Image (spheres, helix red, strand yellow):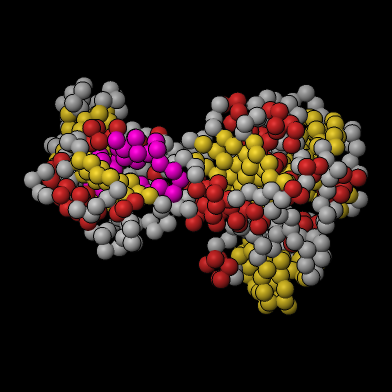
Amino acid sequence: MLASGIKSRPVYGRLTSNPQARSNIMVADAEGALAVLDMVADAPDGFWARTHILYVPGGSAAQDHGAKLAALAPFSWHESPTVPAMLPRLRALLGAARMGTQLYLAGTEPLIGEGIRVAGEFGVDHAGVRTEHRGSLARRVQCVHCKGITESVTMSIVPCAHCGRHLFVRDHYSRRIGAFQGVMIDAEKPGDRPPAEELYR
Amino acid sequence: MSIRPRSSPVRVAEIVPVTPFVKRFRLAATDASPLPRYSGGAHIVVEMRDGGVVRRNPYSLTSSPLHDGDYEISVQRAEVSRGGSVFMHDRVRVGDTLAVSAPVNLFMLDWRARKHVLVAGGIGITPFLAQMAQLSAEGRPFELHYCIRSPERGAYREALERCFPGHVRFYCASKGERLDVTQLVASQPLGTHLYVCGPTPLIDATLEAARAAGWPGHNLHAEHFAAPPSGTPFDVYLQRAGLRVYVGEHESLLEAIEAAGVEVPYLCRGGACGQCETAVLGCDGRLQHHDHWLTTADRAAGRKIMPCVSRFDGRELVLDL
């Protein structure tokens, strides 16, 4: 059922340090912390002393990833309970940042998507953001009919959390709103829909 | 897809000396239909018929893009002219008809920027005049850093101070003032875009400083004001046309091919846009690349050339034209 070959589907890389950057803002959630920790070998001297880290433990709350990140002795460090709770801090950091600041996003797609969306508000081009996907494949999905966002979607077909329409989750992605697009599957024949599959665990 | 700018006739409505070396030309439509709109940073290619020679030079539009109306270009009389700027200065009169292409913008503002920093050297001020009209009207944060040789050679200096107070800073070489590009790029807020237009050393120094300070490539924009360089004359064989063409010392490969009646798509005529990219079918000698388009790998492979600015030195050059 996966629609393929859609260009807007984001592609993520591996986190590598930008040696040219004067300062760094690193945002991670859940297992994204491991991507940050994997950078340690590659990071140049003094890297962490010019790096801000924001972390949302999420599904990895039971691990001690946060303590390991704090042990890197970054310039600043903050743990937030949720991605929305973290965003005001990210905005504050971006608002005060100078050119030569590198943004890194590691973890789930919603975390990366929200980070890129917020960075865009500050004139930061998505192509310059370094990203690595780790952990859950769960998606933010926008219902193209009612425009409501359904969080943590692992199934396609999925009922819209706002209007209840049954949505086929497409790979068609909006950077502006940081969400995949969900379209009503049984618009022509109400009730005629294939079984839901767990595609994005 | 190849684009060839359609040319349309315009009447020279006004010629104003701006400095001893720069003249502004106002170009008006020859009929009631308005000239196409454009955005700040756009240029037109002006076609001059100088006896039997057709000269085509790109000039940035300096008029405000906010309103329909006439086109204005500012032409500096080149110290070593290939003919175009001297023709514009000495031969063109009010009331004359010239042909101009539709506007093309290869030096666009990125409107997502939180701030725009414009760096001009000399006549490189021209694209910024139109851009600043737009930035100012939109209330966007911007600053212009304008390097000039001497006060009398700083085109539009007074007008800039008057129209954009607090947004412009001049660096006058004759007074020993110079722009510290390293300092300039070190203190800009995140989301700033930098635009530079002027002599190659200024462009290179600015871009190099920005990259060294960790600026991503997407935030850097440059427009080279390079006329095609002169060089040793050479012959070129156009395979499809079955023509052998002589390229003189002061004409470009593109100009020589056009004069022989073979059409090549072009937009910028300055080695920047990539439109005139041509396949090299045979090369017994050395390609002299002067463009900003081909990659290092392209150059190493030696199978492409940008005839608008690049030349050849050797025994035989065969092009897929």
Snapshot quadrant of residue A86: top left
Residue shown at 37% from the left, 39% from the top? A94
Snapshot quadrant of residue A186: top left
Look at the image and tell me whether residue B267 can be seen: no
* Extent of the magenta region: A89-116
Residue shown at 16% from the left, 38% from the top? A155
Look at the image and tell me whether residue B319 can be seen: yes
In the image, farthest residue toward the left: A62
In the image, farthest residue toward the front: B176
**B167 above or below B268?**
above
Q: Is residue A98 magenta?
A: yes
User: Looking at the picture, how far across and down is residue B48, in whole percent?
Assistant: 83, 46
Residue shown at 16% from the left, 47% from the top? A66
Relative to B30, is A144 on the left or the right?
Answer: left
Residue shown at 74% from the left, 58% from the top? B228
Q: How many marks?
A: 0
User: Looking at the picture, how far across and down is residue A38, in whole percent?
Assistant: 23, 59
Q: Which quadrant is the C terminus of chain B positioned in?
A: bottom right
**B167 above or below A37?**
above
**B320 above or below A186?**
below
Q: Is residue A42 magenta?
A: no
Relative to B69, is B211 on the left or the right?
Answer: left
Closest to the observer, A186 or A7: A7
User: Looking at the picture, how far across and down is residue A28, in whole percent?
Assistant: 24, 46
Closest to the observer, A66 or A58: A66
